Amino acid sequence: MKVAHDPWAEQDALDKAVEKGGTYTCPKTGWKIRVRYFAPWSAHPRKAATLVMARESVAELAKRKSAGEKLTKEEEAAHDRAMLEIGIRSTVINWQGVKGRDGKTLEFTMHNCLVVFGHFKGLWESICEFAVNPANFEIGVPAPVTDVPDGVDAEGNSPATSDTSSGDSADS
């Protein structure tokens, strides 16, 4: 017996992971970053991009860059910061235990996220890798409802029910 795959239950579980997120723990600092599963169908990246790109200065830089125009060092930094903000808004839910240079706990704000992830590029890269891997999230897919007998295909056809060569078909 083969076990039937339930794509509906799997998608429901993945959608919950997008909203609930998972916790990335930085191995060097112990900082805990709550991260949303970065699913291709999620509205979060689209909403984040819409919000950030609505800023005239960001839209202008993106337009010029995509046209192949060379940006100044300052413009390139502003563009990179906008792309980082889109990534943060798309994936990061909150954090715990993140500390500033002075050792004090940093409040979870967009400004602080941009400072921390802009400075610790390796940390941001690790968070991005974590966010795209569904194995990092508690995705509990319910057990399949039915067992499928061997020889039955994905549409539920078996050799006994799909053979139309006997002349018993409605077309004869």
Image: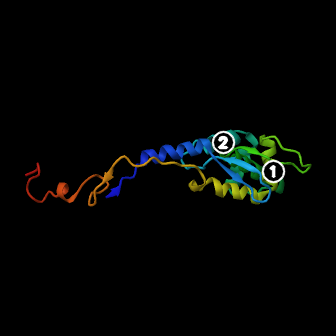
> Residue 126: horizontal and vertical position, in percent?
70, 58
Position of the N terminus by quadrant: bottom left
Q: Name the residue under label 2.
A: 48
51 over 157 or under it: above or below: above
Q: Which element type, helix, strand or loop, lies under badge 1?
A: helix
Q: How many neighbours does mark 2 have within 10 angstroms: few (below 14), some (14-19), or many (20 or more)?
A: some
Residue at left offset 74%, top offset 47%: 82
Numbered circles on residues, count? 2
Q: What residue type is labelled 2?
A: Ala
| In the displayed structure image, the side of residue 100 where residue 27 appears, left or right | left
Residue at left offset 59%, top offset 56%: 133
Residue at left offset 73%, top offset 40%: 56
| In the displayed structure image, the side of residue 69 where residue 161 appears, left or right | left
Q: Name the residue under label 1.
A: 116
Q: Which element type, helix, strand or loop, lies under badge 2?
A: helix
Q: Quadrant of residue 66?
A: bottom right
| In the displayed structure image, the side of residue 141 where residue 147 appears, left or right | left
| In the displayed structure image, the side of residue 70 where residue 155 appears, left or right | left
